[in-house]
Amino acid sequence: QEIEVRLPLWVPAASCGPLRAETRLQFTRWYILDLLEALQQYLPYAARALDSVTPQSRNELLRAAKTLWTVVDRSGNLPQTELEAERQSWRDATSMLDDCLEELKDLEETVDAGSAAEGADDAPTGAPAADAVPESKGDDGTAASPAPPAMSKERQRISATRHLLRLGRLLVHRLVTRSTSTSTTFEDPAFLDTIRQPISRLTALGDDIALELEPPQEGLSEIVEELCRVEDSIATELERAVESRGTPELKTSESEWMKTWRKQRSGVRAKLDAI
């Protein structure tokens, strides 16, 4: 028996717009690698199903085939312009930043657990009754609930820095959504070239921040300073693009949005500096 798989061939037309040859080649390579990986996973299940058709082998084959055809269908969604290609990279950046934010959340919980355990280890045991701290009473004479433990400085820094990184992620996501609805504002090649480097640096900073937030957090101030510089660079380029090519309605909405964003960023930065 023979298995024939017909794959659509994606050949960008000459009239595909300003998509540069190197960008086209890059995305084509990525797509081919994904396709080969899906084929590599599919073929063993196909061979197994041909040798012995069982409910299990059939289900495995169907799952592998679904994955394969999902990749095949993506051939029709490959970018046709530079803006589409950059927008895809911006989406990838938000996904990477989401992973970094999740990692920081886990680190925050780890530090919390460590602080609680340390506090328990340092608590005196078997103290005389005379040395015991009197239990506070509520207004009705009943025992009041114990006060929550103070947040450690390490945990405070992680929380504030995670908020800073989340605000950077918000900038990139804003660019994705706005470039989809008002593409002419952001399709200028000079803008795409300028915004590429700070967004790439922002995603790289996510890993650096996670490392610096590990206790004792000695190099945190420098990495936070760079994070704020990169975010400022992205925000400034967004403002310039809207100001030079945006509609009056877009200018008004983005001005208000950016004002709110900068106010939040200033507040979080001040909070972090005060810790």
Image (cartoon, grey):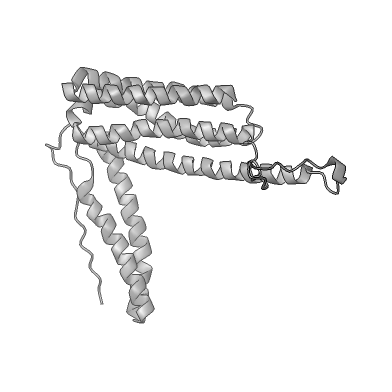
Which quadrant of the figure contains the N terminus?
bottom left
The reply to whether residue 163 is in sight is: yes
Residue 131 percent across, percent down from the top left: 85, 40
Residue placed at 29% from the left, 42% from the top? Answer: 27
Work out whether residue 144 or residue 240 is closer to the camera in this orientation and state it. 144
User: Dividing the image into 4 quarters, which one contains the C terminus?
Assistant: top right
**In the displayed structure, would residue 174 be above or below residue 37?**
above
Give residue 264's position: percent from left, percent from top. Answer: 42, 26
**135, 265: nearer the viewer:** 135
- Quarter of the image holding residue 72? bottom left
Q: Where is residue 117 in the image (x, y as percent from the top left)?
A: 70, 46
Front-most of residues 89 and 126? 126
Q: Does residue 248 appear to the left or right of 34 in the view shown?
A: left
Place residue 257 in its image quadrant: top left
Residue at horizontal 23 percent and vertical 65 percent from the top: 5
Residue 205 vertical position relative to residue 115 in the rendered view, above or below: above
